Image (cartoon, helix red, strand yellow):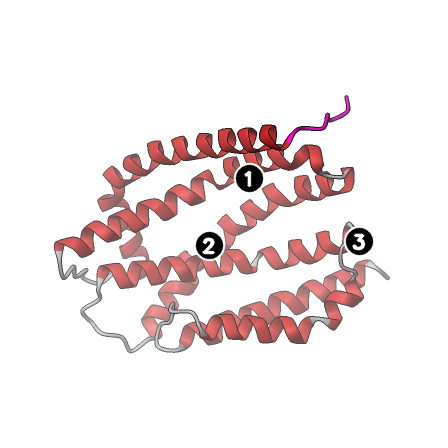
Amino acid sequence: MQDRDQEITEHIAELRTRVTRIGILLLFLLPLLFYFSPDLIHRFWKGVVNEEMFVYSPMEWILLRLGFSLILSLVILYPYAMLELYLFAKPGLYESERRFLKFAIIPSYLLFLAGSYISYKFLVPVLYSLSAGNPFYSAEKTILNALKLSFSLGFLLQVPLAIFLLDKFRILSYETIKNLRIPIYLILIALIFNSSADVGGLTMIALIFSFFVIFELSLFVLSLSKR
């Protein structure tokens, strides 16, 4: 069955409907996670720092609970939000573009979760243990930084999938990606050095090194597959 053409007003109405569905789920999930956030925060804290937690004002605790709950809500809702946006864009996509997105969305999310978990379980605690930080850890600053670091590895694990799919669907060839490695490195370094998620200077080194290893290993594996 062919996708029929739609008027611009129909597109806007459909997009509004899909965004509204996402918003309703977010408004349901956010208060639920906010209610359970004290226990979740303490569990997360023990896994990262395992030291006494200090909260310096009632507002800091409220903002921490809100921020923590919002981030978890967005992570949980991500697959559904991507599905809604894909269904909205589907009529205007070529078949190759549809296949690309179908291949990308679910593996990308699973890699993000796996990388975030590995980072939370191993990398972030090591960085905090090696840092010469203040022993009176601020709950809000520490947890939000830990979340940024955890998600960083999750995003880095998107690199192999992105390189494979870009080449497979002939959006960017292996040779083009390889030739762009220097500009990519420079952009990444600029982004990392302007990031606030730092633990004693170790974060920047760990992220740059991780990206370099993952990027080069992905190119190497792709080059082997072409021989």
Query: Is 150 placed above or below 108 here?
Result: below
Q: Residue at the spot x=72%, y=65% of the render? A: 219
Image x and y of residue 160, in percent: 65, 58
Whole-number angstrom distance, CA of label 1 to CA of label 3: 23 Å
Mark 2 element type: helix
**Mark whose residue sits in front, 2 or 3:** 3
Mark 3 element type: loop
Image x and y of residue 168, in percent: 78, 51
Q: Residue at the spot x=22%, y=74% of the render? A: 134
Q: Which residues are magenta?
A: 1-7
Q: Is residue 113 visible?
A: yes
Asked whether the residues under the numbered discs 2 and 3 touch, taking CB atoms below 8 Å apart as contact, a structural biologist would say no
Mark 3 lies on residue: 170
Mark 1 element type: helix
Q: Residue furthest top?
A: 1
- Please tell me which of labels 2 and 3 falls first in the chain: 2
Mark 1 lies on residue: 82
Q: Quick one: quadrant of the C terminus?
A: bottom right
- Please tell me which of labels 2 and 1 falls first in the chain: 1
Tell whether position 77 is magenta.
no
Asked whether the residues under the numbered discs 1 and 3 touch, taking CB atoms below 8 Å apart as contact, a structural biologist would say no
Side of 38 where 6 appears, left or right: right
Give the quadrant of residue 31: top left
Prevailing SS of the magenta stretch: loop
Callout 2, which amino acid? Ser
Q: Is residue 42 visible?
A: no
Mark 2 lies on residue: 116
**Mark whose residue sits in front, 2 or 1:** 1
Image x and y of residue 100, in percent: 71, 44
Q: Residue at the spot x=42%, y=69% of the render? A: 195
Image x and y of residue 222, in percent: 76, 60
Whole-number angstrom distance, CA of label 2 to CA of label 1: 19 Å
